[in-house]
Image (cartoon, grey):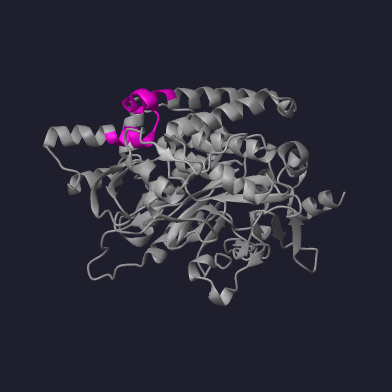
Amino acid sequence: MGIETEYGISAPAGRTGEDDLHPMQLSNHVVKAYGSGAGTSADGRPAGWDYETESPLRDIRGYEVARSSAHPDQLTDSDLGMANVILTNGARLYVDHAHPEYSGPEVTTALDVVRFDKAGDKVMAIAAQRASVYAGRQIRLYKNNTDGKGASYGTHENFLLQRSTPFDRVVTQFTAFLVTRQVFTGAGRVGIGQASQTSGFQISQRADFFEAEVGLETTLNRPIINTRDEPHADAAKHRRLHVITGDANLSETSTWLKVGTAAWVLRVVEAGTLGTDLRLATPVAAMRAVSHDLSCRVPLELADGRRMTAVEIQRVYLERCRALLASPAADGLPAAGRAEAEALFAAWQETLDQLATDVTLLADRLDWVAKLALMESYRARDGLGWDAPKLAAIDLQYADVDPSRSLYAALAAKGRIRRLITDDEIEHARTHPPADTRAYFRGRVMELFGSSVVAASWDSVIFDVPDRPALQRVPLLDPLRGTAEQVGAMLDACTDVSDLFAALGR
């Protein structure tokens, strides 16, 4: 699993008389500034992205949209000449939809997702600082999901599933989970409606932008369940579930719960053991209802006529996950995986209990509650209504990636936000790949032989090897091959890319 995030970007006017730059140009400056001197190919240019195996128009439901009829935003298999950098931690940094995007490497634990997600925030902070010098103006990056004026940009999760799991089961059993998990994954937002046309505060930055239950799109007519069939792995074995409903979280606890609970619910879906019909009568309307309900107590109507709150629905999912962990099906789970699951379930339980009693108790763990508490303190002190521009500015400043400006960072520095990982772990994850997935091979070859890497993708790396007449592609279709245990010693023993291919041949 992993997370990819598009960051909000802005810059005030530059030097006198200088025209404003388009956000795509600004984003290009950001990516190039961070990648300068690193991740370069044999001719000195940044290594490109290999789009050969990408298929953004292929739908899980059994068809492929014609390029001629697709919206331009769906054509993500072309870089339009924008900067692209493959990082030594196995991540990808590039320009997507006029935003700088950090796509973290594949990992196998929820806590590793947190580490590499926070590493992405640090990458962006460094990139913004460097780009500001290069562009001659202050470039600001924000880890949020809307500009408050009608535009939304995504924070997407990716989970590798068994291809054999019926997709209709994913739709019918996972939708209610995504709709109701906002109570602990929401980042908080000033404004109601896509363009903030109604004053107020809501739990999620993304909820108001969803308009369909199931679909292929990600930037228009957004669906709760995305059907893109682009596994980035062996398509006969795997399906990648591209989850686009999540908020951009700064809280480590919110991110940990977001991906950890989703991964376990998907295990239950794969196992076919949910055992309870949790289909919602109107999922899109429920998505907004949950986000607009700060009490977390408004009942939602299920397809069978029952009514349950978001917290009550989440409790059912938690019970089913605990039942799977206690079943023989989980006997092969490694000890570390079982320990993380038990810790995750305990935190999930505590969070739901406190949401059901007093949400303010979670101000030290959940983004939306921390942000709401901050807003209410300003409202009480200055007598502000929810339409006050100052509150919109606070909303934005909470998400600033610059630690010297970020209100989230200020809260964390004062010990008012719980931490799950250390700053040293984040710095290590910024420059080093995870050890237990193919991202290890991708990241290490960028570190050791970056000048010989022509292009890369999630499932391959392409090299220019001096003693070979053609470019050499190393396939990485199995996400669990290319780990430190498998190739670490071999990579350490190679002095150049020719040594690497001699070793691979052996």
Left or right of 443, for residue 247: left
Residue 280 to residue 320: above or below: below
Left or right of 451, for residue 394: left
Q: Nearer the viewer, residue 286 or 94?
A: 286
| Span colored in magenta | 353-372
Residue 27 to residue 167: above or below: below
Q: Position of residue 133 (x, y in %)?
A: 36, 56
Q: Position of residue 45 (x, y in %)?
A: 57, 64
Q: How many marks?
A: 0
Q: Residue at x 57, y 38 (%)?
A: 277
The N terminus - image quarter: top right
Q: Residue furthest bottom?
A: 68
Q: Residue furthest front?
A: 305
Tell me the chief SS of the magenta region.
Answer: helix
Q: Nearer the viewer, residue 481 or 29?
A: 481
Left or right of 138, for residue 385: left
Please indicate, yes or no, whether residue 251 appears anywhere in the rendered image: no
Q: Nearer the viewer, residue 378 or 50?
A: 378
Q: Residue furthest right?
A: 506
Q: Residue at x 60, y 29 (%)?
A: 321
Please indicate, yes or no, whether residue 383 appears anywhere in the rendered image: yes
Left or right of 105, for residue 486: right
Q: Position of residue 217 (x, y in %)?
A: 51, 61
